[in-house]
Amino acid sequence: MSNKRNTIMLFVMLLLILLLLTPMNGVTPNRNTEKREQDTNQIAVEPSGDPTEREEKLSVSVNLEPDEFAVLQTMNQQYMREHQVVVELSNTYPEDAYQRYAEQAMLGDAADVMLLQSEWVNKFAVSGYLLPVDSYFSGVAASEPLDWIMNQVKWNGYIWGIPKDVDPYILVWNPKLLRELSMDQLPSEKEGWINLERHLAKLPNGPYLMAADQNDGYQILSLLRRLGRTGDMSTLLESLRPHLYMTKDSTTLWGMMARGEVLAILSTFSAWQQHHHGELSIEAVNPAQNGKSYWARSQSFVISSKTRLEKEAKDWIQAMTTSKAQEEVFQESRMLPSLKYMYTPSSLPALPGAIRDRLAQMTDLGIKNSPSHVQEMKKLGHVFGQYVQNLVPLQTLALQLESLEMDTIKSVDPHDESEKGTSTMVNP
């Protein structure tokens, strides 16, 4: 009985071992099936054969008018075809650009490359949002851009922006209206303005003397500079205030010019190229002899400090800022080049010689290059608009201008130490 029990137990154990060694579905694994499954997984994650899709995309954000953006899009498409890279190009409304770029940079979401107004570069560099681009400028390249733009994009001994284009502020005036006021040229000093104001005061429904966009602080700065020496501005501005017109939309100024409602307006060279009609004349906002610096707008490419594509960013910027590229931009959108050697009569025949020479020769814009510059310029436009409406006294305007210009706080008599450090533009 014992032997029979042992035999049964042995049989049961052998049966259990056999069941354990056999798969539940009764099918032996097939090595070819396993290999097929592995190959299928590999195909699902394998990148496309197109090399551009295997690389990271370079993101570029600009703030341009539609015609300017169209030119850049064409240049970018050509660059992508030639270099087999993908560049995502996006455009932001110029009015929203500063705030949007600042917020994106603060959150670490900025594009690899941004196009900033050159006067913004200092603020972004101080805030740690940018990478220095000194390596871009080597040898001849270091002396190519206009001096005053390079001074705008420098901070703490480094270069933070690569200039793209230039758009100077100009004075546009109506020669026919001026002749009716017994003058051939717009004045640049106090006596001439007072004489012109006397002629205007005699007309019952005469035109405004000058108009500007108060949302553009640089137009206001240019207007004030044209009026002459700071020390003469107090009584002069009080006399001219009734004949000044402020708007919040630059496009309305051209309509006023067409209807003969204003003698002169502040604008930019590119806007004049787009809107001018009839017999209008242009000139530098302030002539060299009045000792004031000449303001011009410019734009520069910068590289985000968060980018992982620094080399790709520099290569793209270099392609977009060559002399050939800048010449194409000028022909299509009328934005002037940033390269100094292009400022010749043959290269820029439409630009008056006096403006061309000023842009090529000046080294600064007479403005303190500080992180608060952008906010201070906006405030200047707002304060001047209030002054023209007689809502604030002249002293308020004087203090605002004093915080901006490098040459505002000056003594009338350079030997009079008692007046140094105070504004010479006071409330009469």
Image: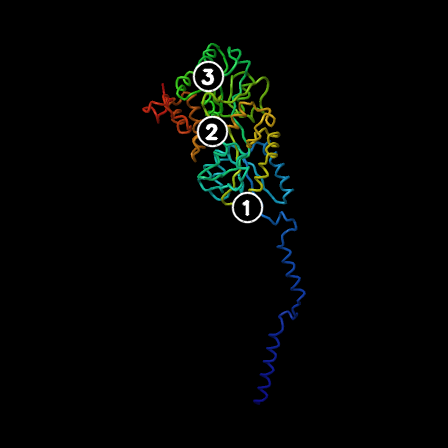
Name the quarter where the N terminus is drawn.
Answer: bottom right
For the residues bearing labels 2 and 3, Cβ distance under 8 angstroms: no
Mark 3 closeness class: few <14, some 14–19, many ≥20 residues within 10 Å: some
**Left or right: 231 as drawn, with respect to 323:** left
Q: Amino acid at mark 1?
A: Leu
Picture coordinates of residue 248, whole percent (x, y): 49, 25
Q: Quadrant of residue 20?
A: bottom right
Above or below 204: residue 96: below
Q: Is residue 249 above or below residue 2?
A: above
- Name the residue at 61% across, 39% down: 76
The label on residue 243 is 3
Q: Nearer the viewer, residue 286 or 413?
A: 413
* Colouring method of the image: rainbow
The label shown at residue 309 is 1
Label located before the other in sequence (2 or 3): 3
Disc 1 element: loop
State the CA–CA distance, disc 2 to disc 3.
27 Å
Q: Is residue 240 left or right of residue 330?
A: left
Q: Considering the numbered disc 2 on the image, is that residue within a helix, a strand or a loop? A: loop
Amino acid of disc 3? His
The kind of residue on which mark 2 rests is Leu
Quarter of the C terminus within the rendering: top left
In whole angstroms, how far apart are the C-alphas of marks 3 and 1? 54 Å
Numbered disc in front, either 2 or 3: 2
- For marks 3 and 1, give the one nearer the viewer: 1
Q: Are marks 3 and 1 in contact (CB under 8 Å)?
A: no
Read off the residue under disc 2. 365
Above or below, 317 against 2 in this view is: above
Residue at the farthest right position: 32
The reply to whether dot 2 and dot 1 touch (C-beta < 8 Å) is: no
Instruction: Bin the neighbour count of mark 1 within 10 Å (Cα to Cα): few under 14, some 14-19, many 20 and up.
Output: some
Residue 353, image x, y percentages: 55, 23
